Amino acid sequence: MKSLKLIYFKMRALAEAPQMLMNYAGIDYEYLMAWDYFNDEWENCKSKVPFKELPVLVVDDKYQIAQSISIMHYIEKIASLELDDPVASARGDAILQSAQELFRPLNPTVNFAVGEDFDSKCQSMKPSLISRFEDLERALIASGKKFFIDDVPRACEFATFHHLDISKRIAPEILEQFTRLQQFMLDIKEIESVANYLDARPNLIDVKVAPKLVIDGVAHPTGTQKT
């Protein structure tokens, strides 16, 4: 089995779907903050990673896989979760990319915005959230299956779950309009290994006021700096 290290920051964002996917697939990995892996502040070591961005997945302490979608595709390959049919695979990729497009401004707002800035960003993004949720609900209904392609969750499902889940910190009433998406969320949460991950992951608190992640019982401000 390959050694896998997922490197990211103190925030609930692009590392969530890869971690849910690895937990679902029973893949062992280590999650490390950038400063712990590189033994330096992020600003001093960002040039050491492709495209100067995180997350990256470090394989066997040698290879760095950048970009969250590429990371999830790699996980699917080693977990034998790839779709053999090219049309089905392309459909899954379309869902994955559509879900990832929700990243901005949704994730930065939840993890970092406060006060009036938070409220303003929430109001401005609601129409786009509703529109994309309509698309995702329609795709689920059209599939006729538990998930977007069949009854097996893959990268596109976990990416979608993350963005639906974090949207509840912005406007929980939006998701309440979509019955099929709510059932999708329940179906993901009923997967024991994924539920265990969701229960054990650091809690995100004080959203809108002073966002923090509770890590090992200690509340740390979200961000890219060691605390």
Image (spheres, rainbow, N blue to C red):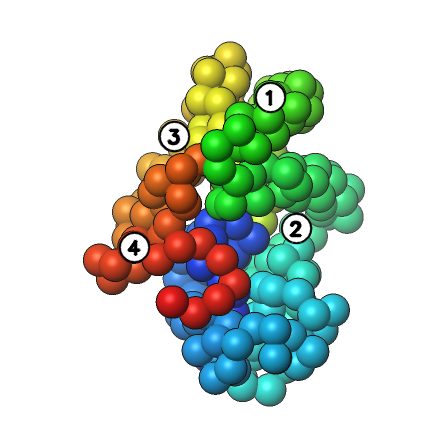
Q: In the rendered image, which quarter is residue 102 located in?
A: top right
Indicate which disc, 4 or 3, sits on the residue closer to the N terminus: 3
Locate the C terminus and report the quarter of the image it occupies.
bottom left
Residue 150 appears anywhere in the view: no
Indicate which disc, 2 or 4, sits on the residue closer to the N terminus: 2
Q: CA distance from mark 2 to mark 4?
A: 40 Å
Q: Secondary structure at mark 4?
A: strand
Residue 191's x, y, as percent?
36, 43
Residue 15 appears anywhere in the view: yes
Eyeballing the image, is 150 above or below 142? Answer: below
Q: CA distance from mark 1 to mark 3?
A: 27 Å
Residue 169's x, y, as percent?
44, 31
Nearer-the-camera pick, 196 or 146: 196
Residue at 70% over, 70% down: 52
Residue position marked by numbered label 2 in the rendering: 83
Q: Which mark is residue 123?
A: 1
User: Which residue reaches farthest front?
Assistant: 116
Residue position marked by numbered label 3 in the rendering: 186
Indicate which disc, 1 or 2, sits on the residue closer to the N terminus: 2
